[in-house]
Image (spheres, grey):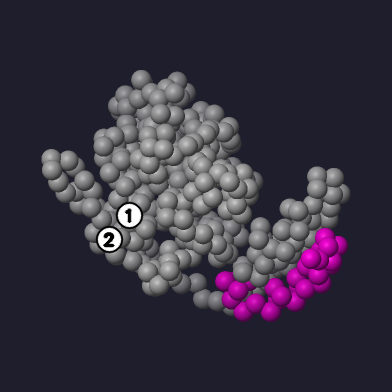
Protein backbone atom coordinates (compact mmCIF):
# COMPACT_ATOMS: atom_id res chain seq x y z
CA UNK A 1 0.00 0.00 0.00
CA UNK A 2 1.28 3.48 -0.90
CA UNK A 3 2.31 5.85 1.88
CA UNK A 4 0.69 9.20 2.59
CA UNK A 5 3.63 11.08 1.05
CA UNK A 6 3.48 8.97 -2.13
CA UNK A 7 -0.26 9.49 -2.52
CA UNK A 8 -0.10 13.26 -1.95
CA UNK A 9 2.76 13.69 -4.41
CA UNK A 10 0.96 11.56 -6.98
CA UNK A 11 -2.29 13.52 -6.55
CA UNK A 12 -0.52 16.86 -6.94
CA UNK A 13 1.43 15.75 -10.01
CA UNK A 14 -1.50 14.36 -11.99
CA UNK A 15 -4.33 16.71 -10.88
CA UNK A 16 -3.74 19.43 -13.49
CA UNK A 17 -3.36 17.02 -16.40
CA UNK A 18 -6.37 14.88 -15.46
CA UNK A 19 -8.72 17.84 -15.02
CA UNK A 20 -7.60 19.75 -18.11
CA UNK A 21 -8.11 16.67 -20.27
CA UNK A 22 -11.83 16.56 -19.42
CA UNK A 23 -14.15 17.42 -22.30
CA UNK A 24 -17.45 17.55 -20.38
CA UNK A 25 -18.61 18.78 -16.98
CA UNK A 26 -19.55 15.23 -16.01
CA UNK A 27 -16.04 13.97 -16.75
CA UNK A 28 -14.62 16.90 -14.79
CA UNK A 29 -16.68 16.11 -11.69
CA UNK A 30 -15.81 12.40 -11.86
CA UNK A 31 -12.08 13.15 -12.11
CA UNK A 32 -12.24 15.64 -9.25
CA UNK A 33 -13.93 13.03 -7.04
CA UNK A 34 -11.26 10.50 -8.01
CA UNK A 35 -8.58 12.95 -6.85
CA UNK A 36 -9.98 14.37 -3.60
CA UNK A 37 -13.44 12.82 -3.10
CA UNK A 38 -14.31 10.86 0.04
CA UNK A 39 -13.59 7.58 -1.75
CA UNK A 40 -10.33 8.77 -3.36
CA UNK A 41 -6.99 7.12 -2.57
CA UNK A 42 -5.94 10.36 -0.87
CA UNK A 43 -8.85 10.34 1.58
CA UNK A 44 -8.72 6.59 2.19
CA UNK A 45 -5.05 6.80 3.23
CA UNK A 46 -5.75 9.90 5.35
CA UNK A 47 -8.58 8.10 7.19
CA UNK A 48 -6.19 5.29 8.14
CA UNK A 49 -3.67 7.66 9.76
CA UNK A 50 -3.63 7.90 13.55
CA UNK A 51 -4.76 11.09 15.32
CA UNK A 52 -1.23 12.48 15.68
CA UNK A 53 -0.47 11.92 11.98
CA UNK A 54 -3.77 13.49 10.94
CA UNK A 55 -2.89 16.65 12.87
CA UNK A 56 0.48 16.80 11.12
CA UNK A 57 -0.84 16.19 7.60
CA UNK A 58 -4.19 18.02 7.81
CA UNK A 59 -2.76 21.33 6.55
CA UNK A 60 -1.12 19.56 3.65
CA UNK A 61 -4.42 17.84 2.83
CA UNK A 62 -6.26 21.17 2.77
CA UNK A 63 -3.64 22.71 0.48
CA UNK A 64 -3.96 19.82 -1.98
CA UNK A 65 -7.76 20.11 -1.92
CA UNK A 66 -7.58 23.86 -2.56
CA UNK A 67 -5.15 23.35 -5.43
CA UNK A 68 -7.37 20.72 -7.09
CA UNK A 69 -10.52 22.81 -6.59
CA UNK A 70 -8.81 25.88 -8.08
CA UNK A 71 -7.95 23.91 -11.24
CA UNK A 72 -11.45 22.39 -11.22
CA UNK A 73 -13.28 25.74 -11.11
CA UNK A 74 -11.06 27.20 -13.82
CA UNK A 75 -11.71 24.24 -16.12
CA UNK A 76 -15.40 24.29 -15.23
CA UNK A 77 -15.77 27.89 -16.39
CA UNK A 78 -14.05 27.08 -19.67
CA UNK A 79 -16.36 24.13 -20.31
CA UNK A 80 -19.47 26.14 -19.41
CA UNK A 81 -18.64 28.73 -22.06
CA UNK A 82 -18.18 26.00 -24.69
CA UNK A 83 -21.35 24.02 -23.93
CA UNK A 84 -24.80 25.41 -24.86
CA UNK A 85 -27.18 26.07 -21.99
CA UNK A 86 -30.27 23.96 -22.47
CA UNK A 87 -33.57 24.84 -20.89
CA UNK A 88 -34.34 22.22 -18.26
CA UNK A 89 -37.92 21.27 -17.52
CA UNK A 90 -38.58 18.66 -14.85
CA UNK A 91 -42.01 17.31 -14.09
CA UNK A 92 -42.39 14.34 -11.81
CA UNK A 93 -45.33 12.87 -9.93
CA UNK A 94 -44.21 10.34 -7.36
CA UNK A 95 -47.41 9.34 -5.69
CA UNK A 96 -51.10 9.75 -6.32
CA UNK A 97 -52.86 9.77 -2.95
CA UNK A 98 -56.05 8.51 -4.59
CA UNK A 99 -54.41 5.14 -5.25
CA UNK A 100 -55.73 3.57 -2.06
CA UNK A 101 -57.40 0.17 -1.93
CA UNK A 102 -59.42 -1.45 0.81
CA UNK A 103 -58.90 -5.08 1.77
CA UNK A 104 -60.70 -6.86 4.65
CA UNK A 105 -61.92 -3.47 5.94
CA UNK A 106 -58.31 -2.29 6.34
CA UNK A 107 -56.89 0.59 4.39
CA UNK A 108 -53.89 -0.55 2.38
CA UNK A 109 -51.81 1.30 -0.15
CA UNK A 110 -50.85 -0.74 -3.20
CA UNK A 111 -48.00 0.12 -5.49
CA UNK A 112 -48.95 0.75 -9.11
CA UNK A 113 -47.42 2.62 -12.03
CA UNK A 114 -48.41 6.00 -10.57
CA UNK A 115 -46.96 5.35 -7.11
CA UNK A 116 -43.43 4.21 -7.91
CA UNK A 117 -40.55 6.06 -6.21
CA UNK A 118 -38.45 5.56 -9.34
CA UNK A 119 -39.14 5.28 -13.05
CA UNK A 120 -36.79 2.34 -13.63
CA UNK A 121 -38.89 -0.61 -12.49
CA UNK A 122 -42.61 -1.18 -12.07
CA UNK A 123 -42.44 -4.70 -10.67
CA UNK A 124 -44.54 -5.25 -7.53
CA UNK A 125 -41.82 -7.38 -5.93
CA UNK A 126 -38.94 -4.96 -6.56
CA UNK A 127 -37.18 -4.47 -3.18
CA UNK A 128 -37.63 -0.68 -3.27
CA UNK A 129 -41.33 -0.96 -4.08
CA UNK A 130 -41.91 -3.48 -1.30
CA UNK A 131 -40.23 -1.12 1.20
CA UNK A 132 -42.26 1.85 -0.04
CA UNK A 133 -45.47 -0.15 0.32
CA UNK A 134 -44.54 -1.07 3.91
CA UNK A 135 -43.82 2.56 4.76
CA UNK A 136 -47.12 3.69 3.24
CA UNK A 137 -48.99 1.09 5.29
CA UNK A 138 -47.23 2.12 8.52
CA UNK A 139 -48.01 5.81 7.94
CA UNK A 140 -51.58 4.98 6.96
CA UNK A 141 -52.08 3.05 10.21
CA UNK A 142 -50.73 6.11 12.07
CA UNK A 143 -53.21 8.35 10.17
CA UNK A 144 -50.41 10.45 8.71
CA UNK A 145 -51.13 12.51 5.61
CA UNK A 146 -49.04 11.97 2.48
CA UNK A 147 -47.59 15.16 0.97
CA UNK A 148 -46.61 15.35 -2.74
CA UNK A 149 -42.92 15.85 -3.45
CA UNK A 150 -41.13 18.37 -5.65
CA UNK A 151 -37.67 17.40 -6.86
CA UNK A 152 -37.01 20.77 -8.48
CA UNK A 153 -37.01 23.21 -5.59
CA UNK A 154 -35.67 26.58 -4.50
CA UNK A 155 -32.33 27.00 -2.78
CA UNK A 156 -34.27 28.76 -0.02
CA UNK A 157 -36.52 25.73 0.61
CA UNK A 158 -33.70 23.19 0.29
CA UNK A 159 -31.15 25.05 2.44
CA UNK A 160 -31.97 28.45 3.92
CA UNK A 161 -35.27 27.59 5.61
CA UNK A 162 -33.61 24.51 7.12
CA UNK A 163 -30.85 26.53 8.77
CA UNK A 164 -28.20 25.36 6.28
CA UNK A 165 -26.24 28.58 5.82
CA UNK A 166 -24.27 29.72 2.75
CA UNK A 167 -20.89 28.49 4.02
CA UNK A 168 -22.16 24.97 4.82
CA UNK A 169 -20.30 22.27 2.82
CA UNK A 170 -23.61 20.63 1.86
CA UNK A 171 -24.27 23.63 -0.41
CA UNK A 172 -21.03 23.23 -2.35
CA UNK A 173 -21.61 23.59 -6.08
CA UNK A 174 -19.60 20.45 -6.77
CA UNK A 175 -21.78 18.36 -4.42
CA UNK A 176 -25.21 19.43 -5.69
CA UNK A 177 -27.08 19.77 -8.97
CA UNK A 178 -27.83 23.48 -9.32
CA UNK A 179 -30.11 24.55 -12.17
CA UNK A 180 -29.28 28.20 -11.49
CA UNK A 181 -28.49 30.37 -8.45
CA UNK A 182 -32.05 30.08 -7.11
CA UNK A 183 -33.06 26.56 -8.20
CA UNK A 184 -31.69 23.11 -7.38
CA UNK A 185 -32.51 19.41 -7.63
CA UNK A 186 -33.29 18.73 -4.00
CA UNK A 187 -30.58 17.07 -1.93
CA UNK A 188 -33.02 15.68 0.65
CA UNK A 189 -36.76 15.11 1.03
CA UNK A 190 -36.70 17.46 4.03
CA UNK A 191 -37.40 20.26 1.55
CA UNK A 192 -41.04 19.12 1.84
CA UNK A 193 -40.86 19.72 5.60
CA UNK A 194 -39.59 23.27 5.04
CA UNK A 195 -42.48 23.87 2.62
CA UNK A 196 -45.01 22.52 5.14
CA UNK A 197 -43.60 24.71 7.92
CA UNK A 198 -43.44 27.87 5.80
CA UNK A 199 -47.10 27.42 4.77
CA UNK A 200 -48.31 26.32 8.23
CA UNK A 201 -49.03 29.80 9.69
CA UNK A 202 -50.29 28.11 12.88
CA UNK A 203 -53.64 27.20 11.30
CA UNK A 204 -54.06 24.00 13.35
CA UNK A 205 -52.87 22.61 16.68
CA UNK A 206 -51.41 19.46 15.14
CA UNK A 207 -50.36 17.82 11.90
CA UNK A 208 -48.81 14.49 10.90
CA UNK A 209 -47.31 14.42 7.42
CA UNK A 210 -44.84 12.38 5.41
CA UNK A 211 -43.37 12.24 1.92
CA UNK A 212 -41.33 9.86 -0.24
CA UNK A 213 -39.38 10.76 -3.35
CA UNK A 214 -36.13 10.99 -5.25
CA UNK A 215 -33.22 13.16 -4.10
CA UNK A 216 -30.02 14.07 -5.94
CA UNK A 217 -26.40 14.48 -4.82
CA UNK A 218 -23.29 14.71 -6.91
CA UNK A 219 -21.72 11.47 -5.63
CA UNK A 220 -19.55 9.02 -7.53
CA UNK A 221 -21.17 5.60 -7.95
CA UNK A 222 -19.95 2.99 -5.49
CA UNK A 223 -21.43 0.22 -3.35
CA UNK A 224 -23.18 2.68 -0.99
CA UNK A 225 -23.59 5.88 -3.04
CA UNK A 226 -25.54 6.96 -6.12
CA UNK A 227 -26.23 10.43 -7.57
CA UNK A 228 -29.97 9.65 -7.35
CA UNK A 229 -31.70 7.78 -4.55
CA UNK A 230 -34.98 7.80 -2.60
CA UNK A 231 -35.88 9.21 0.81
CA UNK A 232 -38.76 9.00 3.28
CA UNK A 233 -39.29 12.05 5.50
CA UNK A 234 -41.89 12.66 8.23
CA UNK A 235 -42.90 15.82 10.10
CA UNK A 236 -45.12 15.55 13.21
CA UNK A 237 -46.64 18.08 15.60
CA UNK A 238 -49.06 17.56 18.50
CA UNK A 239 -49.36 19.21 21.89
CA UNK A 240 -49.32 15.77 23.54
CA UNK A 241 -46.24 14.55 21.67
CA UNK A 242 -43.07 14.33 23.77
CA UNK A 243 -39.56 13.03 23.05
CA UNK A 244 -40.52 9.79 24.81
CA UNK A 245 -43.57 9.39 22.54
CA UNK A 246 -41.44 10.26 19.52
CA UNK A 247 -38.88 7.57 20.38
CA UNK A 248 -41.77 5.14 20.71
CA UNK A 249 -42.88 6.02 17.17
CA UNK A 250 -39.35 5.42 15.86
CA UNK A 251 -39.18 2.06 17.64
CA UNK A 252 -42.57 1.03 16.22
CA UNK A 253 -41.46 2.09 12.73
CA UNK A 254 -38.21 0.13 13.04
CA UNK A 255 -39.92 -3.03 14.26
CA UNK A 256 -42.74 -2.68 11.70
CA UNK A 257 -40.12 -2.77 8.92
CA UNK A 258 -37.60 -5.25 10.37
CA UNK A 259 -39.68 -7.30 12.81
CA UNK A 260 -40.51 -7.17 16.52
CA UNK A 261 -37.21 -8.79 17.53
CA UNK A 262 -35.00 -6.14 15.93
CA UNK A 263 -32.68 -4.54 18.49
CA UNK A 264 -32.02 -0.79 18.42
CA UNK A 265 -30.25 2.05 20.19
CA UNK A 266 -30.31 5.86 20.13
CA UNK A 267 -27.31 8.22 19.90
CA UNK A 268 -26.99 11.99 20.15
CA UNK A 269 -26.19 13.62 16.82
CA UNK A 270 -26.27 16.95 14.96
CA UNK A 271 -28.35 18.22 12.05
CA UNK A 272 -28.70 21.95 11.20
CA UNK A 273 -32.52 21.73 11.15
CA UNK A 274 -33.09 19.81 14.42
CA UNK A 275 -32.10 20.53 18.04
CA UNK A 276 -31.73 18.22 19.86
CA UNK A 277 -30.84 15.67 17.18
CA UNK A 278 -30.50 11.92 17.46
CA UNK A 279 -29.69 8.89 15.34
CA UNK A 280 -31.16 5.42 15.60
CA UNK A 281 -28.99 2.34 15.05
CA UNK A 282 -30.07 -1.27 14.60
CA UNK A 283 -28.20 -4.56 14.90
CA UNK A 284 -26.28 -5.40 11.73
CA UNK A 285 -28.52 -7.61 9.58
CA UNK A 286 -25.51 -8.99 7.69
CA UNK A 287 -23.54 -10.44 10.61
CA UNK A 288 -26.10 -10.57 13.45
CA UNK A 289 -23.82 -8.44 15.68
CA UNK A 290 -20.71 -10.65 15.35
CA UNK A 291 -18.94 -7.94 13.36
CA UNK A 292 -18.27 -7.58 9.62
CA UNK A 293 -16.95 -5.08 7.05
CA UNK A 294 -20.45 -3.65 6.50
CA UNK A 295 -20.82 -2.50 10.14
CA UNK A 296 -17.06 -1.88 10.63
CA UNK A 297 -17.02 -4.77 13.13
CA UNK A 298 -19.26 -2.81 15.52
CA UNK A 299 -22.38 -4.97 15.15
CA UNK A 300 -24.48 -1.82 14.66
CA UNK A 301 -25.63 0.10 11.57
CA UNK A 302 -27.10 3.61 11.43
CA UNK A 303 -30.76 3.48 10.39
CA UNK A 304 -32.20 7.01 10.51
CA UNK A 305 -31.76 10.58 11.70
CA UNK A 306 -34.34 12.44 13.78
CA UNK A 307 -34.94 15.30 16.21
CA UNK A 308 -36.99 18.34 17.21
CA UNK A 309 -37.17 21.11 14.61
CA UNK A 310 -34.58 23.78 15.46
CA UNK A 311 -36.03 27.07 16.82
CA UNK A 312 -34.01 28.89 14.11
CA UNK A 313 -35.95 26.96 11.47
CA UNK A 314 -39.24 27.89 13.16
CA UNK A 315 -38.15 31.53 13.15
CA UNK A 316 -37.30 31.43 9.44
CA UNK A 317 -40.72 29.86 8.75
CA UNK A 318 -42.55 32.43 10.93
CA UNK A 319 -43.66 29.89 13.55
CA UNK A 320 -43.78 30.57 17.29
CA UNK A 321 -40.75 29.29 19.18
CA UNK A 322 -42.97 27.47 21.68
CA UNK A 323 -44.12 24.99 19.00
CA UNK A 324 -42.54 21.55 19.35
CA UNK A 325 -42.31 19.80 15.99
CA UNK A 326 -40.63 16.44 15.43
CA UNK A 327 -39.08 15.11 12.23
CA UNK A 328 -37.19 12.07 11.00
CA UNK A 329 -35.91 10.76 7.69
CA UNK A 330 -34.34 7.70 6.12
CA UNK A 331 -33.15 6.45 2.74
CA UNK A 332 -35.40 3.85 1.08
CA UNK A 333 -32.37 2.13 -0.45
CA UNK A 334 -30.76 1.87 2.99
CA UNK A 335 -33.83 0.03 4.33
CA UNK A 336 -33.92 -2.30 1.31
CA UNK A 337 -30.20 -3.10 1.62
CA UNK A 338 -30.47 -3.88 5.33
CA UNK A 339 -33.76 -5.76 5.07
CA UNK A 340 -32.78 -7.93 2.10
CA UNK A 341 -29.01 -8.08 2.84
CA UNK A 342 -27.91 -6.33 -0.35
CA UNK A 343 -24.31 -5.12 -0.05
CA UNK A 344 -24.18 -3.05 -3.26
CA UNK A 345 -26.75 -0.30 -3.83
CA UNK A 346 -26.16 -0.47 -7.59
CA UNK A 347 -27.81 -3.90 -7.70
CA UNK A 348 -31.15 -2.22 -6.94
CA UNK A 349 -31.00 -0.47 -10.30
CA UNK A 350 -29.80 -3.36 -12.47
CA UNK A 351 -31.97 -4.63 -15.34
CA UNK A 352 -32.13 -8.27 -14.21
CA UNK A 353 -32.55 -8.35 -10.43
CA UNK A 354 -33.27 -12.07 -10.18
CA UNK A 355 -30.04 -12.88 -12.01
CA UNK A 356 -27.97 -10.34 -10.05
CA UNK A 357 -29.16 -11.55 -6.65
CA UNK A 358 -28.19 -15.19 -7.32
Residue 8 falls within the magenta-colored stretch: yes
Query: CB atoms at circles 1 and 2 under 8 Å apart?
Result: yes
Residue in the image at 45% along x and 24% along y: 243
Residue 225 coordinates in the image, percent (x, y): 54, 59
**Residue under pointer 1:** 130
Specify whether residue 274 is in view.
no
Binning the other alpha carbons within 10 Å of mark 1 as few (below 14), some (14 to 19) or many (20 upward) gives: some
Which is more toward the observer, 327 or 336?
A: 336
Magenta segment boundaries in residue numbering: 1-28
Q: Secondary structure at mark 2?
A: loop
**Residue under pointer 2:** 124
Q: Is residue 206 left or right of residue 8?
A: left
Binning the other alpha carbons within 10 Å of mark 2 as few (below 14), some (14 to 19) or many (20 upward) gives: some
Which is more toward the observer, 97 or 330?
A: 330
Specify whether residue 22 is in view.
yes
Q: Secondary structure at mark 1?
A: helix
Amino acid sequence: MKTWKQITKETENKSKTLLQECKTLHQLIVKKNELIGKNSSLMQVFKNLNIAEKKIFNKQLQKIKQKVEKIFFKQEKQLETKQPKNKITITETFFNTQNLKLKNNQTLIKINQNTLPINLNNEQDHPLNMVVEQIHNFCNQMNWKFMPSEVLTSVESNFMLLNIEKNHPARNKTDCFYINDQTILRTHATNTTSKILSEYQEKTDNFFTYTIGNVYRNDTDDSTHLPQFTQFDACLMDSNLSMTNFKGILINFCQFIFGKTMQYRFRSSYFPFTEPSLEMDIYCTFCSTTGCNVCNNSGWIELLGAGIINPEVLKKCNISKNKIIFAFGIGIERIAMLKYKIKDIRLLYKNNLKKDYK
